[in-house]
Amino acid sequence: MYDYLIVGAGLFGAVFAHEAEKKGKKCLVIDKRTHIGGNVYTEDVEGIAVHKYGAHIFHTSNKEIWEYVQQFAEFNRYTNSPVANFHGEIYSMPFNMYTFNKMWGVVTPEEARQKIDEQVKASKIDNPKNLEEQAISLVGKDIYEKLVKGYTEKQWGRKATELPAFIIKRLPVRFTYDNNYFNDTYQGIPIGGYTGMIEKMLDGVDVRLGVDFFENREALKAEAKKLVFTGMIDEYFDYSLGALEYRGLKFETETLDEANYQGNAVVNYTDYETPYTRIIEHKHFEFGMQSKTVVTREYPQKWVRGEEPYYPMNDDRNNSLYEKYKELANKETDVIFGGRLGQYQYYDMDDVIEAALNCAEANL
Ligand SMILES: Cc1cc2nc3c(=O)[nH]c(=O)nc-3n(C[C@H](O)[C@H](O)[C@H](O)COP(=O)(O)OP(=O)(O)OC[C@H]3O[C@@H](n4cnc5c(N)ncnc54)[C@H](O)[C@@H]3O)c2cc1C
């Protein structure tokens, strides 16, 4: 008899299991996938750690979480500095002085600020009614048209004029020559990939892979006193109130017989015509010097049930449906719902680790 059956070997499940075992509880972790790690899983191809479910860059300003993860992996000094490719023109992301210099030939922060202010003023938008108006009112029309519009329309599968303004609350504009995408204090990639990190978290824990909870629900539940569920909350309740929606993704990965394909880990394709939103060249996350390289093209997709759910669509309809599922969840005794699918929310890795630690603290 286990103390906990943990459904999902992703970050939430692995952190919870680690903390539970530390407190002397016996855990069984299952996952329907044939590997541990959930979406942070990395796979070794040609000596390169390939991020199978999209680029994962660890970044946080939470010192406690940064120190917590150091016990499971050594992190490198990777700093996320994506570049944007608009029909072959290359721009720095986030929008910074390199971007403004390339866009308008301006050199000083003052000139750049003036240029943006001019364009924002010329747009005459006081009360943005959609995403297009919102973006133009924040950064002006040049940056919007070359670096925001096409990418956003591909990402959401809808015209920017048909998307709500609230999706973009702010567009980070930086009047320095700093290419670091994130503002967080700590950042890096675990050397050798994330899978080793999760392996260490799950050290000493019983793990069964390729096991879908719903295919053997009662028998699995009978093996433990309590359940930690990190799968989809609506599936747990048999979609009885309706299905929550997600945005899907498709990844096309290939190994190339060359050492350096694009010179950067992440290149965003910001025009509408290129069907993918970005190309990831995995070796650059770890400054790899291998003779081959592995690249992944990322295509946003309409999500259909049965496919991997990537991004929760946190609009009013889905959020209020989730609240109803949460009411059902609160009535379940001895079941904890956690993680991005169990709580229907986008979590960065540091957030999900923090959530799992808080959950462990409250329950163990
Ligand atoms: C494309 C993409 C890029 C991202 N990039 C970053 C980034 O750069 N930085 C960052 O901090 N965060 C990033 N994230 C977020 C990060 O992936 C999440 O924070 C993290 O994976 C959440 O962990 P989790 O345990 O909640 O979920 P998951 O990793 O999804 O784990 C849940 C596990 O449960 C399993 N499961 C579900 N249902 C069942 C079932 N019925 N039976 C058995 N097993 C089941 C699933 O197979 C899965 O393995 C990104 C997310 C995406 C989608």
Image: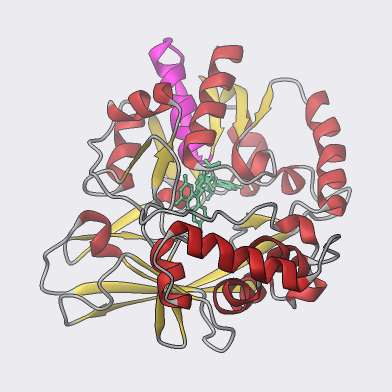
Depth order, front residue of 179/2: 179
| Residue 160 appears left or right of 217 | right
- Residue 213 appears at what percent x and percent y? 60, 44
Which quadrant, please, contains the C terminus? top right
Q: Residue at x 68, y 26 (%)?
A: 335
Residue 36 appears in the rendering = no
Indicate the quadrant where residue 272 lies: bottom right
In the image, residue 12 lies in the stretch drawn in magenta? yes
Image height check: is 4 above or below 316?
A: above
In the image, residue 21 lies in the stretch drawn in magenta? yes
Q: Residue at x 55, y 13 (%)?
A: 361
How many numbered circles are shown?
0
| Residue 208 appears left or right of 238 | left
Q: Residue at x 75, y 63 (%)?
A: 134
Rendering colour mode:
secondary structure
Indicate the quadrant where residue 302 lies: bottom right
What stretch of residues is rendered in magenta?
Answer: 8-30
Q: Residue at x 57, y 63 (%)?
A: 114
